[in-house]
Image (spheres, grey):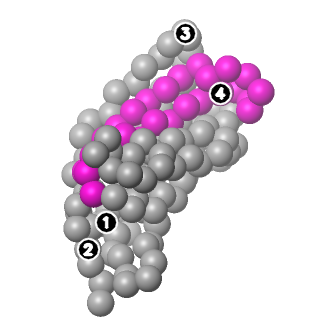
C-alpha cells in the first residue's frame, strides 16, 4: 500500500553573502514526471531536489541541507559537496516528517573554500 506525500513549494530566494556572479535556483522535476513521491510500508522513495547554477558553465561544488520542521523529532538531512555538472547538482532526500522543510543550497568554488552563494526554498511535506 502506498501513501502519497504532497509537496507545496514556496519561491526560493538567493542570499549572496559574498559578492559573486553565481546565482542558484531550485528545480523539483526533470519535466518527465510531476514533482511528487510515494511512500511504501517499509521504505521511502527519495525526492530529488536539483540546484541550478547560473551561469550554466560555472564550475564549483554545491552542498544541500534539508532542515527538518521545528515540530518534528527527526534530524536535518545533508547532501555533501558535489561538483557542478552541466549547470546543476542533484540531491535525493527522504523526507520522513510532515511539515515545512527548508532546503538550502550552498555554492563554493571548491570544497575547501568558503561558501559564496546560498539559496533557500521551503517544501511542505504531508501524508
According to the image, label 4 marks what residue?
A: 108
Looking at the image, residue 49 lies above or below residue 62:
below
Which comes before the other along the chain, label 2 or label 4? 2
Marked residue nearer the N-terminal end (3 or 4): 3
Q: Look at the image and tell me whether residue 123 can be seen.
A: no
Foreground of the two, 99 or 25: 99
Query: Residue placed at 30% from the left, 84% from the top?
Result: 2
Nearest to N terminus: mark 3 or mark 2: 2
Residue drawn 51% across the image and 41% down it:
65
Q: Which residue is mark 3?
A: 19
Question: Which of the two marks, 2 or 1, is nearer to us in this view?
Answer: 2
Estimate the spatial distance between the alpha carbons at disc 3 and disc 2, rounded to whole Å: 41 Å
Q: CA distance from mark 3 to mark 4?
A: 12 Å
Q: Which residue is mark 2?
A: 4
Write down the region rendered in magenta: 98-124
Return the residue at label 1: 36
Amino acid at each position: 500500500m502506498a501513501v502519497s506525500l504532497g509537496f507545496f513549494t514556496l519561491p526560493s530566494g538567493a542570499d549572496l553573502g559574498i559578492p559573486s556572479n553565481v546565482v542558484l535556483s531550485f528545480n523539483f522535476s526533470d519535466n518527465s514526471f510531476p514533482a511528487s513521491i510515494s511512500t511504501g510500508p517499509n521504505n521511502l522513495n527519495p525526492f530529488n531536489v536539483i540546484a541550478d547554477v547560473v551561469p550554466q558553465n560555472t564550475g564549483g561544488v554545491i552542498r544541500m541541507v534539508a532542515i527538518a520542521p521545528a515540530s518534528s523529532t527527526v534530524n536535518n538531512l545533508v547532501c555533501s559537496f558535489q561538483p557542478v555538472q552541466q549547470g546543476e547538482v542533484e540531491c535525493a532526500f527522504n523526507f520522513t516528517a510532515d511539515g515545512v522543510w527548508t532546503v538550502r543550497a550552498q555554492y563554493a568554488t571548491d570544497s575547501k573554500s568558503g561558501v559564496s552563494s546560498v539559496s533557500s526554498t521551503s517544501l511542505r511535506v504531508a501524508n
